[in-house]
Structure formats: C-alpha cells, structure tokens
Amino acid sequence: MSRLGIFVDRKTLSSAEQLHALIRCRDVAEEMGHSADFLFPVDIRKIPMMDALFIRARTDPLNVTYVASRMAESHGIPVIDDPASIRICSDKINMYSHLMQNDVPIPRTLFLSRHDLSLSRVREIFDEIGSPIILKEPSTSFSLRVEKVHDPGQFLQVAKRFIRMSDWIVVQQFVESRYDWRVGVLNGELLYVCKYTIPDTTFKIQDSVNGHLVYCKVESIAAEQAPARVLETGIAAANAIGTGLYGVDLKTNNGDCTVIEVNDNPSLEGGEDDLYPDVYRTIISRLLEH
C-alpha cells in the first residue's frame, strides 16, 4: 500500500464543490488500495513520508505550494504539480515563449517592456495587431489582471498599472468567441475536454461585473465530439510545457485554433470531468504506479 499526500489549504476547502472533489480523490485512492492524507501547510514536514504528492492548492513560486513541490522533488517523490511546471505556467511570458519555441499556434503576441511603454510604440502595436487588444500582467491567474483595451490612451492607462507589478507586459490579439475549450492533459495524453461558455457580461471565463463575481458555464464534452484539431493542439501545448497535469485553454475562430494559455493545477471540481469518471484514477496511477 502506498501513501498519497493531497496538499491543500483553507481556500481549497472554501466551496462545497472543491471539498467534494477532494473527498472523491481520497476515496478513489483508497479504492485502489492506497492511503490518502490531506496535508495543510503546517503539515509540510510530513511530505518526505509520502510516496507521492498531489497539490490541490493555488500554485505560485512565491507560495508554500512551490516549497512543497520542491521538497517532494528533492526527496525523489513524484509530485503534481512539479516545480518546473509551476515556474513556467505562473509566468505568462515564460509560458508563451515555450509555446512559440514549439510552434504551437497562439494569438498574435508581443512582450512589451517598461522601457518601450510610449505612445508612439503603442500606436505601432495597434497598427500591427488591430483593435481591441488584450493586456496581461505576466503573473495573472483566474483571469485577474487581464484587460481588453480599444485605443492607445486606454492601453497606456492599463499598462502603467500592470507595469508596477512587472517589468514586462503581455500584449495579445483579441480572439472573439463565446466559449473556450479546456483540454486536460496528463503526461502527454488526453485526460478530459470541456467547454467554458463565457458570460454575456464579460470576455473572460471569470470576472467581477458591477461588484459581483460571474463565472463561465462548464460543459463536459465527450472526446469524440470535440474537434480533432482542438485535441491535437491542446496536447501539443501541454507537451511544450512538460509531462505533468495541465489545463489548456483554446479558442476556435474562423477555422483557426489558438492556445490562449496553459494552466498547471487545473480545476477539477466544476464539472470538467463529468464524462470522464476515471480522471482521479488516472492521476493516482500516474503518481503511484508509473
């Protein structure tokens, strides 16, 4: 019998859906003949006693989750998410650079430094990319610090706010769509696929509108009903990052398929896996039986 550590924090347990998903993960591990322990940050010293670690809390190189991941790796313990995946996916410039180097299709994307932030350069960017334009602060997650701008004045206003947090900004072509595809990939193989239908009040899958949080609708899609190009591109994007567990967001528009981003630590509690009952079994097998 192997021992699985499931690394969580208080925020992980903040919703009934997340708690249900964690309990389900533990139950599957036990059905497979393993034990599963929930580890909180105060339990981090117990990681070397585990046979594998599954991180189910927000990942970031500045968070304790990264320390947990590094600790597992240093002790030769299989871990999802691994430190390299956390470093790459938490920095959008790093992540997009990996996609570009591997010829994965993405929207037209530029990296703008604080030294190039001038009205003349911004006007050139609008001529190159068109309007509207998406601006992203590189450490963004959960659609935070992602804004759509329509003119140079608005661009500069948002960019100057983002540049206080980073020396660089991601500048990206806007791709019109009412939904995103989410392709879950583990070790280079398809894990699940779903659609995120974007609320009418925003262009993002999660946003604050008039002081209220709005979320996308999640619809699990059978693999055979998803466009082959979406699946192939999603797997190619994941492989450009590593061999871990990733949620790849893609958009289709006028026959094109482009990757919007690759996420480590993808959500598994919103209905993404409704048509894929073996998701946790597959993850646990990867961690404990590979």
Image (cartoon, rainbow, N blue to C red):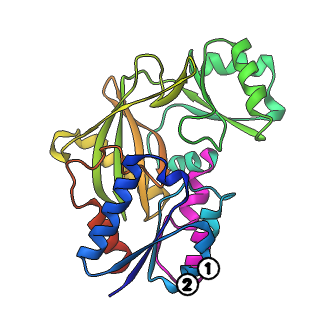
- What secondary structure do most residues of the magenta stretch adopt? helix
- Looking at the picture, how far across and down is residue 3, in whole percent? 40, 82
Q: Amino acid at mark 1?
A: Arg
Q: Quadrant of residue 194?
A: top left
Residue visible at 50% across and 53% down in the picture: 12
- Looking at the picture, how far across and down is residue 210, in whole percent? 56, 16
- Please check the rendered image and state whether residue 159 is part of the magenta-colored stretch, yes or no: no
Compared with residue 7, is residue 142 higher up or lower down, i.e. above or below?
Answer: above
Compared with residue 206, is residue 27 higher up or lower down, i.e. above or below?
Answer: below
Q: Nearer the viewer, residue 119 or 23?
A: 23
The outermost residue toward the left is 224
Decide if residue 182 is on the left or right side of residue 227. Answer: right
Residue visible at 56% across and 67% down in the picture: 40
Q: Quadrant of residue 254?
A: top left
Q: Nearer the viewer, residue 19 or 63?
A: 19
Is the residue under label 2 in contact with that under label 1 (CB below 8 Å)? Answer: yes
- Looking at the picture, how far across and down is residue 77, in whole percent? 50, 81
Quarter occupied by the N terminus: bottom left
Residue visible at 70% across and 19% down in the picture: 155
Q: Which residue is mark 2?
A: 48
Decide if residue 37 is on the left or right side of residue 254. Answer: right
Q: Amino acid at mark 2?
A: Pro
Q: Nearer the viewer, residue 202 or 158?
A: 202
Find residue 45 and name its label: 1
Decide if residue 100 is on the left or right side of residue 270. Answer: right
**Residue 290 makes an appearance in the image:** no
Compared with residue 99, is residue 172 higher up or lower down, i.e. above or below?
Answer: above
Q: How many numbered discs?
A: 2
